Image: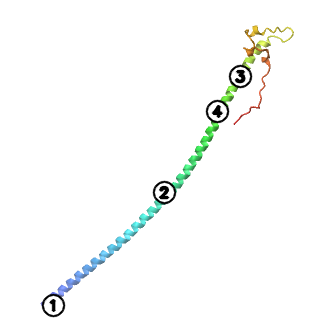
Amino acid sequence: MASRGGTCSGSSSDQENHQDLTTEIIRKRKRMISNRESARRSRMRKQKHLDDLTAQAANLRAENNHILTNINHVTQMYLNVEADNSVLRAQISELNHRLKSLTDIISCMRLDGAAFDDQEFGDNYDYDHDQMIGGGDDLFSPWSLVHVKQPIMASSDYGFMY
């Protein structure tokens, strides 16, 4: 009978070992399933993150192209304005030169006119104009000519050329 108890106790120990083994296998399978699920969720998160980054990169490329287009447009407008300013500066320079020339002519006319206003142009005018201006040949001193009192006519035919 003693042997029966020994066998009984041995079989219960086998059952416990078998249960422990079964429990261990079940825990390993649960852990394996849990790890697989965790890995699947991790892959899904990574894929979503990759998709988000890809979409963000596409948006940034589109925005970059838009900015480059705007920069090119603004640069072209700037170059056009610079060209217009260059033309306007040249016109200002030309007009200032014309104004100075006309001012000089008017100034000379006033000086010569004051000398001519002192005399009367009549029968007693003595045509000795060389002595009054300082002498010399009329061809080499054009401001001393008698016809200096003629008005200078300005014409709008020149206009502005663009």
Residue 111 in view: no
Q: Does the CB distance between marks 1 and 4 fall below 8 Å?
A: no
Q: Earlier in the sequence, mark 2 or mark 3?
A: 2
Q: Does the CB distance between marks 2 and 3 fall below 8 Å?
A: no
On screen, residue 99 above or below 6: above
Q: Quadrant of residue 154 in the image?
A: top right
Q: CA distance from mark 2 to mark 4?
A: 47 Å
- Quickly name the residue at label 1: 4
Q: In the image, what residue occupies the spot 74% across and 16% down?
A: 142
Residue 19 in view: yes
- Quickly name the residue at label 3: 103
- Quickly name the residue at label 2: 57
Which sits in the foreground, 65 or 138?
A: 138
Q: Which mark is residue 89?
A: 4
Q: Position of residue 161 (x, y in %)?
A: 71, 35
Q: Amino acid at mark 2?
A: Ala
Q: Earlier in the sequence, mark 1 or mark 4?
A: 1
Which sits in the foreground, 80 or 140?
A: 140
Q: Earlier in the sequence, mark 1 or mark 2?
A: 1
Q: Which mark is residue 144?
A: none
Q: In the image, what residue occupies the spot 73% across and 14% down?
A: 141
**Badge 2: few (under 14), some or many (20 or more) residues near its Cα, within 10 Å?**
few
Give the SS element for disc 1.
helix
**Badge 1: few (under 14), some or many (20 or more) residues near its Cα, within 10 Å?**
few
Q: In the image, what residue occupies the spot 35% across and 72% down?
A: 34
**Badge 4: few (under 14), some or many (20 or more) residues near its Cα, within 10 Å?**
few
Q: Does the CB distance between marks 1 and 2 fall below 8 Å?
A: no
